[in-house]
Image (cartoon, grey):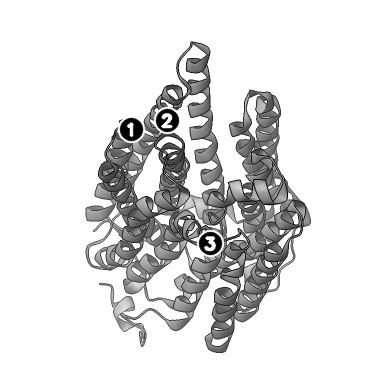
Amino acid sequence: MPAAIEDRPTAQAGKTPLVVRLLVLATFVVILNETLMINAIPRLMESLHVTEQAAQWVSTAFMLTMAAVIPVTGWFLQRVTTRQGYTIAMGVFLAGTALSAVAPTFSVLLAGRIIQAAGTAVMMPLLMTTLMTVVPEQDRGKVMGNVTLAISVAPALGPAISGLILQLGSWRLLFVAVIPIAGAVTYFGLRQLDNIGEPQVSTLDWASAAMATLGFGGLVYGLSLFGEGESNLGPSIGIVIAGAATIASFVLRQLKLQRTGAPLMDLRTLTHRTFALSLALMCVAFLAMMGSMILLPLYLQNLRGLTPLQTGLLLMPGGLAMGLLGPTVGRLYDRLGSRPLILPGSIGIVLSLAGFTQVSMSMPYWQVLALHALLMVSLAATFTLIFTLGMGALPPNMYPHGSSILGTLQQVAAAVGTALVVTVMSARSSSLVAEGAAASAAQLSGMKLAFVVATVLAVVTIVVAAMLPSKTNASGEVMAH
């Protein structure tokens, strides 16, 4: 190990700093809400008298807001102290949760979800930036394992937890249950939280902020329309193209600002090869995860007749395994580097998705559970390592920008994954129904094809994993071994 690292004062060595633990807990609570409403769609339709397409917006709007707000967080977190960032993020989240709990109409509920998401969008970059600043390089893997718990397990557990809560009563309980937990996390966080680093005064380039919001928000919105039938295909493609064109203008403006001033999102982070590769791997892995999270509940509820609660309980072991394994993977990374872990993780993702291409009306439930657990465990290995490697490859002044880019592309990947599997499944089942096939057989065939597409895409993760270094050192330079 380099002397510089050995000599660094590490009173916290081997332990996760309290500030990071508090931020992990807060991030878990807020990110859980991204998928908490998936099971509540039928209740919302009945209670607030809205169509299924409209009800889906409680999840779509959350993802959309995250994609639109996260690009601005890099600038925001450089301007405020850790405590100010935490107070604003949790305060906004709590306000949105309270508004959603008492919403008299669907439009008010939607507004509450958007406010919730704006608070959530700040928490993940705040956690990442703080972690990279306070945790010694040799302990980052283990600590990043705990972060994996918050970032990837929370959305995986959302549907299971909401299934349990919905057994007790109204969809409003999903928000009522969160308020005291989020309130306690905010209170204890502010009692214990110290400021990390000094705020930097910089001006916000409003044109960049507008382009990022319209570009990334438009792209995610356009992709979310793909699953709503052929009548929306023209507008969907138009919005996606407009979003992509706005993102291209945003990129050109950032490149110009890098030469003359302060860019909103510093794209020089992408010149660090390890960060760029980690980003590519994260996007494909997240795309595969979101695709399976959409397809499996549809398969288990629509075709196998399980209730939302039964579906949640069947998929819960995979989510829990992912969470429990994250810290272990992190500790192994600190000792062994990424090579012995990231390739098996990528191969596991491909094998589990390949297993799901064989779904049938009689596939044993233990097989579904085992394949889902394999997928989640493989994703835990992959996410923990790419977050640690990717962020570790950046110099400290780039951490807010790196976490902002990571968070934004995670939302875009989730939207692409969802749009892709729903579009493939719908197109395939529609064509089979038109040929005279039974609806259930057509839908099953559509799901199989969607899993085939996800499997083919996941092969990319193996290729990228093979190109990643084993470790990066404290200054962000790549170490081969």
State left or right for residue 333 relative to residue 402.
left
Q: Is residue 340 above or below residue 327?
A: above
Residue 194, above or below 381: below
Label 3 and label 1: CA atoms lie apart by 30 Å
| Residue 306 percent coordinates (x, y) | 41, 43
Residue type (three-letter) at the residue carrying disc 1: Val
Which of these two is toward me, 465 or 289?
289
Label 2 with label 1: CB-CB less than 8 Å: yes
Task: Give the residue displayed 51% in from the left and 55% down from the top.
Answer: 406
Which is in the foreground here, disc 2 or disc 3? 2
Numbered tag placed on residue 31 in the rendering: 3
**Residue 41 x %, y %:** 59, 47
Crowd around label 2: few <14 · some 14–19 · many ≥20 (10 Å)? many
What residue is at 73 percent from the left and 61 percent from the top? Answer: 103
Cα–Cα gap, marks 2 and 1: 8 Å
| Badge number at residue 359 | 1
Three-letter residue code for mark 2: Met
The x and y percentages for residue 438 are 45, 19
Q: Amino acid at mark 3?
A: Ile
- Which residue in the protein does label 2 denote? 447
Please tell me whether residue 420 is drawn above or below residue 141 in the rendered image: above
**Which residue is at the front of the view, 187 or 258?**
187
